[in-house]
Amino acid sequence: MRLEDTIAAVATAPGEAAIGVIKISGPRALEIADAVFRARSGVRLVNCPGFTVHYGVVWDAERGEAVDEALATVMRAPRSYTREDVVELSCHGGPVPVSRVLQLVLSQGARLAEPGEFTRRAFLRGRIDLIQAEATLDLVRARTEESGRAAMEQLGGQLSAEIRQLRRALIEVLAEVEARLDFPDEVGPLQVDQLRERVAGVRRVAEELLATAKAGRILREGMRVAIVGRPNVGKSSLLNALVREARAIVTEVPGTTRDVIEEWINVRGIPVALADTAGLRDTQDPVEAEGVRRALCAVDRADLVVLVLDDSAGIQPEDVRIAKWLAGRQSIAVVNKIDLGCDQITGEAVQDLLPGARVVRVSALRGWGIQDLETTIAQLAWDGVVVSRHKPLVTNIRHQEALRQAVEHLSRADAGLAEGIPAELISIDLREAWECLGEMVGESVSEDVLDEIFRQFCVGK
């Protein structure tokens, strides 16, 4: 990636839309935009101040024709997303005008942007740190209001501020240790108890942040829930009840569902990927057998399994066999068809079948008990984690791993201080912890890591 290049890309989603935006950023952004845009007012974009919008047409000089009406938004460095000169051309959102405008911009010397290159430039030019850069992608991908709020807090710098404060505290401790290495006579011996207290304070905050990682991961990535059971117990009806629409085909014929049907829903602010699976049973039908295989794969990927039982039929041998497959997994037993009033399955029977599982009684057909099921899913998702609106969440596995390593180095430094280990060795662990925290905000991170992060972005972001 070359920062001296001027880059361009379509910043809006493909397909038909009211508006399509072509973003241009770099040292020649104004010059290139000026070459393809004619303002109705007659002004030249190269002479326009920042934060101004101009109406006109995008002009194809080679063909001598207007391509589309457009608005040109001028943002001059450093007051732009990338801290470079930026021009956004907003034209009609059809594939043809968007493609032609982009091609005209590229023909004037702009280079097609790489995935995430606009945000990467914002990071490299110091407008945002790496946590904030990753949060922009999380905000785009957010599936619920809560996950969007978590991303917005990181984009606003809440987590970054905590990490920088920890780094400042660590560098002060490190400076004190190294001063006693370099100037033992002038500074005097280490004040071990005071240093241990300061190291423990940093570690405590790091551990508190690390404790939010499960809740943060669920908000960022969602929770995978597989609905399983023998044929005709109401799995597809349960999916439809949770989705609030007829997403899956429901019939009285066993084995209707042959493939895994997945749908995202919002459960108390948690993004949940529901997977309705084929009925689990022995079958000679090759198509149904493939459905069973895929169902078992969905179970393997799931964070939570919902075993559906038919209250009107009682617990059957196939239910027992399925329950054995689920041993050791986080599970909810849903006793369905309670509207029939049969009461064939008791709570005690469910606990014998699937020890430790939560039990929820529902009628998927009538919608009874669905809110109780959603509450239970949310409780198991958080697993006792209390999420505070006043504390930042760690939502990214990269951040989680960096914090884990930092805590490990801090623990070793504290143990070294307690055991009287030489200061040279203690300073190594303190510096390693400082470096780990630096990786989070991007102050000490390799090009390979940056490439991996920004490869996940779309081209126009």
Image (cartoon, rainbow, N blue to C red):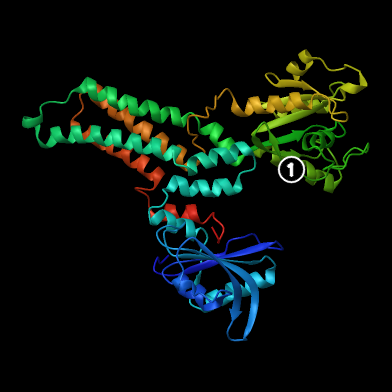
Spot occupied by residue 357 in the image (x, y as percentages of width and height) = 70, 21
Rendered position, 220 above or below 268? below
The residue at the point 24 percent across, 32 percent down is 173
Residue that lies at the very extreme toward the front in this rendered image: 41
Relative to 240, 51 lies left or right: left
Relative to 179, 49 lies left or right: right
Badge 1 crowding class, 10 Å Cα cut-off, few under 14, some 14 to 19, many 20 or more, is some
Of the residues shown, which amino acid type is indicated by label 1? Glu
Relative to 446, 294 lies left or right: right
Spot occupied by residue 66 in the image (x, y as percentages of width and height) = 64, 79
* Circle 1: element type: strand
Residue that lies at the very extreme toward the top in this rendered image: 348
**Residue 329 seen from this side:** no
The residue at the point 59 percent across, 49 percent down is 140
Q: Which residue is mark 1?
A: 263
The residue at the point 17 percent across, 36 percent down is 178
Q: Quadrant of the N terminus?
A: bottom left
